[in-house]
Image: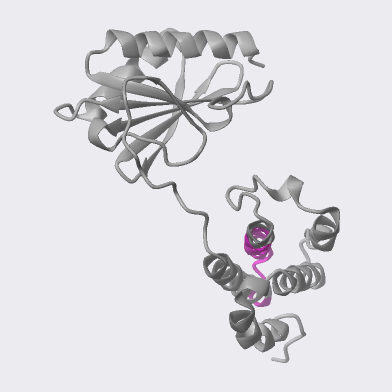
């Protein structure tokens, strides 16, 4: 596994690459290492501004070539986000490096976890948390899909939808308590009674009765955490309850 020293070494080398590339006019640390030292397992997140008359995709390809050559990096995937492009790498020792580029005239913080390292940035609105309505809506969609997969005998796919619905319900619980409602970041910080409520919602066996039991637990937890959109939850509750009972052919 990578060490903190390995991560710091790569960070300094990437910042050196930025200093040597006239096309790059600003840079910042983002994520867990932006405002603190993170921990032993924190990945590396650096973002850069590209001069407005330059293609950030050309810069990204040049840097990718260098990272592969110098560090044997593996390009995992790209994630476009607004004006930015994120490229995620896996480096030896299981170090994840998230590299992103943005045109200079739109380069700025989209969350509090942003520390400008050089150059300048612009004011940008922070990316909002998902709404309670959105989270609840996705969860309802997923429990519907799960139940239909159970009826079709597609048990692996049913488990996929049940797990996804539980994640949305837990994110709804996080949002309700002022915790991060993205990517499970707030799950471990939820009160123990909330986590206990969802503890029985994990599928333990790919059989119809067990899948239906787990789905029922997810639905109960979802309805319990729907205070912010109670009118919506009350409207669909009878249909959600119908998903928890045995159906006749």
Q: Which quadrant is the C terminus positioned in?
A: bottom right
Q: Nearer the viewer, residue 169 or 75?
A: 169
Which residues lie in the magenta part?
Answer: 151-169
Residue pictured at 19% horizontal, 29% vertical: 55
Residue 171 lies, in percent from the top left, at 64, 57
Residue pictured at 72% horizontal, 88% vertical: 247
Residue 16 lies, in percent from the top left, at 38, 8
Residue 236 lies, in percent from the top left, at 62, 84
Name the side, left or right, on which 77 lies relative to 188. Answer: left
Q: Quadrant of residue 86?
A: top left
Residue 167 magenta-highlighted: yes
Q: Quadrant of residue 122?
A: top left
Q: How are the residues colored?
A: one colour
Q: Which quadrant is the N terminus positioned in?
A: top right
Q: Is residue 149 visible?
A: no
Q: Taking 83 as reference, is 53 above or below it? A: above
**Looking at the magenta stretch, what is its main secondary structure?**
helix
Q: Nearer the viewer, residue 233 or 152?
A: 233
Residue pictured at 81% horizontal, 72% vertical: 209
Residue 119 lies, in percent from the top left, at 32, 20
Q: Is residue 90 visible?
A: yes
Q: Nearer the viewer, residue 167 or 29?
A: 29
Name the side, left or right, on which 212 lies relative to 15. Answer: right
Q: Residue furthest bottom?
A: 248
Count of marks overlaid on the render: 0
Residue pictured at 59% horizontal, 72% vertical: 145
Q: Nearer the viewer, residue 207 or 59?
A: 59
Residue 104 magenta-highlighted: no
């Amino acid at each position: 596994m990578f060490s903190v020293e390995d991560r710091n070494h790569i960070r300094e080398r990437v910042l050196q690459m930025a200093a040597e590339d006239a096309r790059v006019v600003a840079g910042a640390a983002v994520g867990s290492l932006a405002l603190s030292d993170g921990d032993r397992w924190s990945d590396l997140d650096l973002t850069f501004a590209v001069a407005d008359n330059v293609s950030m995709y050309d810069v990204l390809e040049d840097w990718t070539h260098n990272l592969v050559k110098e560090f044997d990096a593996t390009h995992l995937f790209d994630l476009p986000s607004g004006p930015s492009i994120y490229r995620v790498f896996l480096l030896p020792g299981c170090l994840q490096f998230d590299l992103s580029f943005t045109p200079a005239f739109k380069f700025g913080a989209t969350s509090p976890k942003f520390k400008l390292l050089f150059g300048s940035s612009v004011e940008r609105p922070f990316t909002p948390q998902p709404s309670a309505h959105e989270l609840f809506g996705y969860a309802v969609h997923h429990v519907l899909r799960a139940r239909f997969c159970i009826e079709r005998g597609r048990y692996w796919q049913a488990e996929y939808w049940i797990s996804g619905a539980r994640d949305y319900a837990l994110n709804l619980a996080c949002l309700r308590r002022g915790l991060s409602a993205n990517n499970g970041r707030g799950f471990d910080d939820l009160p123990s009674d909330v986590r206990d409520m969802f503890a029985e919602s994990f599928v333990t066996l790919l059989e119809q009765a067990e899948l239906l039991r787990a789905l029922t637990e997810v639905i109960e937890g979802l309805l319990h955490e729907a205070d912010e959109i109670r009118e919506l939850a009350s409207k669909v509750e009878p249909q959600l309850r119908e998903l928890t009972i045995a159906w006749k052919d």
